[in-house]
Image (cartoon, rainbow, N blue to C red):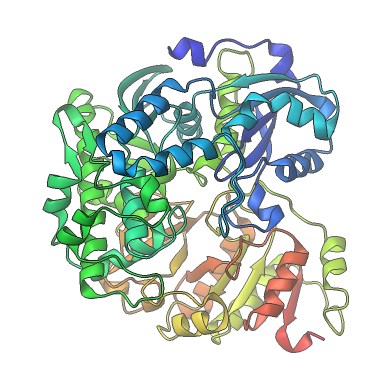
Amino acid sequence: MLRFYLAPLNEDCVALYTLGLATMDNSAAALMHNGVLLAAVENERLTRAKNDGSFPFEAIDEVLRIAGITAQDIGLVAVYWQPWRLRGRSFGTLAKMLRAPSQAAAPAARALQLFRRSGAEGAAPSGSWADLFRLRRKLISRYGNIPAAIRYYDHHLTHQLYAEAMQGWDNCLSLSLDGGGEDASTVLTAVQNGTRTELSRHRWPNSLGHFYSVFTGYLGFQMLEGEYKMMGLAPYGTPVWKEDILRHILRLRSHGRYQLNTRLADYHGARSGRYHARLKVLFGPPRAADEEPTQDHINLAASVQAAYEEALAHVLAPARAAYPALSRVALSGGCALNVTANGALLSRGLVSEVSIPPAPHDAGCAIGACIAAHHGTAVTADKAALRSPYLGAAFEDADICAALEGHIKELPTPLPDAQLAEQTAKRLASGQIIAWFQGGAEFGPRALGARSFLADPRQDSIRDALNDKIKKRELFRPFAPSVTEEAAQDYFTLAQPSPYMNIVAPVTECHRADIPAVTHTDGSARVHTVSQGANPLYHALLSAFGRATGVPVLLNTSFNIQEPIVYSPADAVATFRASGVDALVIGPYIIAREQLT
């Protein structure tokens, strides 16, 4: 089966440009040339529609623009999904409907949506499964007759290959888990010196992603968006219902298998706001979106998180026993954004090291499809380029000046990098909140020092100021720290880098009082380690702040206000104006709020 997925491709195709596409949910485009990743952009950054899942024409246009080519230069279009594999989903949907006939309408409606654009009011723009069957026609409609071949790759394979490229590991376990691919929701593979052995494949609708999303909705958060909110709420509670969940809803079976009770945890019903009456008996009533969480709601969040972590460990356990030398794990899929569970794998000693890419969700599959296309060819993917999260456009000073025109009284003097870092650090140390826009835009859901709001983590009150001025978000949600890689182990109990902010780790006891604004209620933090090589200017800023304060750590949150992270200088200026932050540091310029017209 793997040979089918990785069948050798005509090398003339990959010697040209390879366009990778993810076309549903978090749609994206990536561009590779001779094994070097040139660009990757999520469609939402350009359309400004959060979680945009529509066909990624805008993202395709952007990666072509960044590379300075046209669609006629593309030799291969690599797609993250094999749409003809309908059997698994069809049987899974039918089984759900037979088990619960009264709930059959929701999965049937969702099945129809897969073949047509979603028009649900308030929903993110969504592509369709049918787009993948008419892909060439869609591309021709915009770009004319292009010569590219089109290849489709297994969804979970594209997740896994991208995750594995983050490290130089010859041997590891690779686990992809999400809501679902063509027919599976969880795939575990042993990677040994270039050989891939599939160890387990968990068939949809058994899905850890759907399990977590159902309870996200039950607790009043938006499904497929608010999962991180439930995760942030969990540490305030006690997992009193963990065993009830594992007994009635997420049943752990032998040999690392699990079974989701889709009658009680009905994902498609939950998308429509309908929940089985038994859930109310077990856990109390669902929370309304505008309702303050009760202690029962908080305890349920803790219980769901604990059950998920138990299931994750259970899936890995047989492989760890059978392959004791494979102690490192590459995690991918939307579930790999559960940073608390990622950290728990390390803190519980289940693995020695964990690696998660900057975009483990479906957008990252656009890159994974490019990597899959190069298997079996003489062209080897350049892993150094793949590991950078700064894959969007970097803008020239002229672009920045054009965006500032009409918004400021006078253009300030441009500063060299060292002076820019020192002056910004002084502002931060004095209590200012800074909007930071530098270099290439991040790919993935995390702000990693290119498009960030920054603040001093030493003052706990800064969290209230951030929420008041910009974020307007729930007070229980933690803010994350960025720290120089050299100082990371002084401040956090984490024996490995975390360059993409995908691991939660304990703050060391001796430093909790030093960085209260980024220390969660359970003493943990979602850590972002910054090396000088990965982001020289942001590392210089952290170092300058460390020299000024003795603490080489900054509070780092995404540069956005209820919208996708800003992408262009125009986005940055508009969001800065709409916020209450003190200054915008964009390119070589520091723009104080009082300089705005």
| Foreground of the two, 524 or 209 | 209
Residue 478 drawn above or below residue 493: below
Look at 15% across and 46% down and name the residue there: 248
Location of residue 255 in the rendering, given as x and y in whole percent from the top left corner: 17, 27
Look at 48% across and 80% down and name the residue there: 549
Look at 64% across and 52% down and name the residue there: 44
Q: Quadrant of residue 409?
A: bottom right
Q: If the image is split into quadrants, where does the C terminus sit?
A: bottom right
Residue 564 drawn above or below residue 82: below
Location of residue 473 in the rendering, given as x and y in whole percent from the top left corner: 47, 74
Name the residue at the front extreme: 102
| Foreground of the two, 593 or 238 | 238
Location of residue 42 in the rendering, given as x and y in whole percent from the top left corner: 63, 47
| Foreground of the two, 458 or 556 | 556
Look at 43% across and 70% down and name the residue there: 479
Location of residue 190 in the rendering, given as x and y in whole percent from the top left corner: 33, 23
Q: If the image is split into quadrants, where does the N terminus sit?
A: top left
Residue 346 drawn above or below residue 404: above
Residue 102, can we see it? yes
From the viewer's perspective, tell me whether residue 219 is left or right of residue 367.
left
Q: How many marks?
A: 0
Residue 522, can we see it? no
From the viewer's perspective, tell me whether residue 435 is left or right of residue 409.
left
Q: Quadrant of residue 186?
A: top left
